[in-house]
Amino acid sequence: VEHLPDLARPDLQVVSVSGSLNRNLAANPLDIVLGLSQRAGAQGYFLPVPYLAASEAEKQVLLAQKSVSDMLGLARKADLLLVGIGSLEADAHLRQIGMLNEREWNELRALGAVGDLMGSFIDPAGQPVAAGINRLAMGLGLGDLAGRRVVALAGGANKAKAVLAALRTGAISDLIIDEDAALPMLRLLQAGRESGHGRSTKG
């Protein structure tokens, strides 16, 4: 967003597709909606919920709020979706900011999760793992992305496994990454082919 030119597009609407990155609804350190709407002169809308609910009961209460259902309805009408891809390496951002506690992070790792796409924690094949936290995501889910224009952005060598897994969900139509992520991704793909366990990757 910082590198985008100023645009005069007051006709645009920018809306969150996921909740805040904090369960306590504190300020979101990665919130791009405000910056993007200001840069484009567009209308900005925020999803007033945490990225992950504290429990399934809390999730149902939040989803029942009209403000939340209205924002989700608006998000489902978007012509273009921009999403990030989170890793589950030791330095995972969600772990660092306390979004995932140690018990949750250890459970996800034990179940084979390597990445996070819009609150869905996925294994190397791009399938959601059987963790309780996978029922707590607030916002659009992987099922809402089918047949949509979905641009994913990620960078850094620690994102390689997560990006490959995200591509294998079949939900991503466009990918923007840096060289630091691309080179280890290539090595992982080559190693998979050489071992005979490579998987096709869409993207």
Image (tube, rainbow, N blue to C red):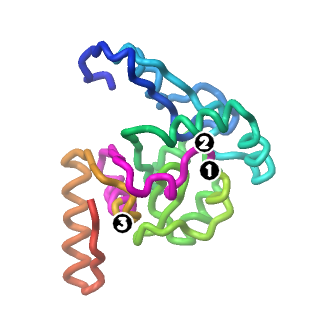
Mark 2 or mark 1: whose residue is earlier in sequence: 2
Looking at the rendered structure, the kind of residue marked 2 is Tyr
Q: What is the x, y in percent for residue 18?
A: 55, 40
The kind of residue on which mark 3 rests is Arg
In primary-sequence order, the first of circles 1 and 3 is 1
**Mark 3 residue element:** loop
- As measured in the structure, the alpha-carbon distance from the residue carrying label 1 to the one carrying label 3 is 20 Å
Taking the image as shown, residue 53 lies to the left or right of residue 172, namely right
Q: Residues within 10 Å of mark 3 (few under 14, many from 20)?
A: many
Q: Name the outermost residue toward the bottom.
A: 196
Question: Measured from the top left, where is residue 45 in percent x and y?
Answer: 54, 25
Give the quarter of the image for residue 170: bottom left
- 54 relative to 79, above or below: below
- Location of mark 2 (residue): 51
Q: Nearer the viewer, residue 171 or 127?
A: 171
Return the residue at label 1: 137
Q: Earlier in the sequence, mark 2 or mark 3?
A: 2
Camera-side residue of 180 and 145:
145
Q: Position of residue 106 (x, y in %)?
A: 60, 63
Q: Quadrant of the C terminus?
A: bottom left
71 or 82, nearer to the observer: 71
- Residue stretch in magenta: 137-166
Q: Is residue 126 left or right of residue 194?
A: right
- For label 2, the crowd category at 10 Å Cα-Cα, with few meaning under 14, some 14 to 19 and many 20 or more, is many
**Image quadrant in which the N terminus is located:** top left
Q: Residue at 35%, 53% (x, y): give it.
A: 159
